[in-house]
Amino acid sequence: MNILEKIIARKREEVSEAKTKKSISSLEKEPLFSRSTSSLTSALRDSSSPRIISEFKRKSPSKGIINDQVLPEIVTADYVNAGAAGLSVLTDSDYFGGSFDDFLRARKANPQIPMLRKDFIVDEYQLFEAKSIGADVILLIAACLTPSEITKLSKKAHELGLEVLLEVHNAEELAVSTGDDIDIVGVNNRNLKTFETSIETSIALSELIPDSFVKISESGLKDAETIVKLYQYGYKGFLIGETFMKTVNPGAALADLQKTLTQHSNLNPLVL
């Protein structure tokens, strides 16, 4: 059993446990459930320059502890002040050190910015959880789900007013996973089975993603040069966590990257 399979097996156990503690009707009564969502899709599609989705992540299975000395409300507010287009906050506890509390504290500090609940979604119940903690976007990972599961979960997410980010790792996943209820296609440059990264993955898939979807690139993004290169292949957003989080001041790290990116603000996506 590889690490991804272990994570999913544990996630299914977590969801079963959560269902015994709080019903969907109880989740629907949470104050944030009725909150009007903010659109990450629009923030990215309407942008004429590369935009950063900044992530709050304490640890990962491949790197261990990345940064457990910072507070989500401070880091995410700093991200927003530095120009982040959206926020991603991990809610997986066992493998990534995240929590609903982290998400809620980030949400309270940043009421309007689009926020992605970063987790391994395997059950509709988790969509109601996401809505109850103030998420705007949910993540569906093609490597973890069947095409029919993706269709079912994305449709339900839209019914709840949540946008859907579909994460793919190769052409095969892309071919069978996209549908009418997907808003954003994210190409993860990290192989979830080996945890090695290569931006060539994003380059290879760029031509295969229909223009109807906003494209973002994830993982292995460390410098402005890489981001600008991928922007020329049509990627509008760039999800970055570890690069920022491994610094003493993640918000300042984003600000520094933004300064470099402003030098390329007049770039237009390459016509392929």
Image (tube, rainbow, N blue to C red):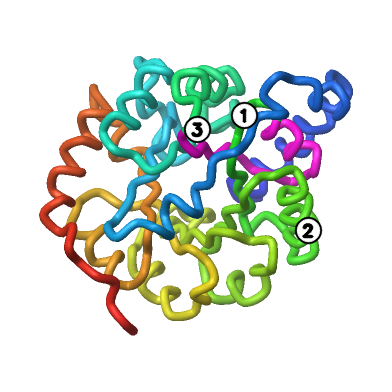
Q: Which residues are magenta?
A: 113-131
Q: Is residue 156 left or right of residue 184?
A: right
User: How many numbered discs?
Assistant: 3
Amino acid type indicated by mark 1: Gly
* Corner quadrant of residue 49: bottom left
Residue neighbourhood size for the residue with mark 2, other residues' Cα within 10 Å, grouped as few (<14), some (14–19), many (≥20) = some
Q: Is residue 61 left or right of residue 65?
A: right
In the displayed structure, 216 sits above or below 14; it is below
SS assignment at label 1: loop
Question: What is the C-alpha distance between the residues marked 2 and 1?
Answer: 23 Å
Q: Circle 1 is placed at which residue position?
A: 134
Choose between 87 and 250: the one closer to the eye: 87
Dot 2 or dot 3: first in sequence order is: 3
The picture places residue 237, in percent across and down from the top left corner, at: 38, 55
The picture places residue 145, in percent across and down from the top left corner, at: 71, 57
Question: What is the C-alpha distance between the residues marked 1 and 3?
Answer: 11 Å
Residue neighbourhood size for the residue with mark 3, other residues' Cα within 10 Å, grouped as few (<14), some (14–19), many (≥20) = many
- The label nearer to you, 1 versus 3, is 1
Identified at 69% across, 61% down, the residue is 181
Amino acid type indicated by mark 3: Val
Label at residue 83: none
Identified at 29% across, 40% down, the residue is 243
In the displayed structure, 64 sits above or below 139; it is above
Q: Circle 3 is placed at which residue position?
A: 89
The answer to the question of whether label 1 and label 3 lie on touching residues, with beta carbons closer than 8 A, is: no
Identified at 37% across, 64% down, the residue is 235
Q: Circle 2 is placed at which residue position?
A: 149
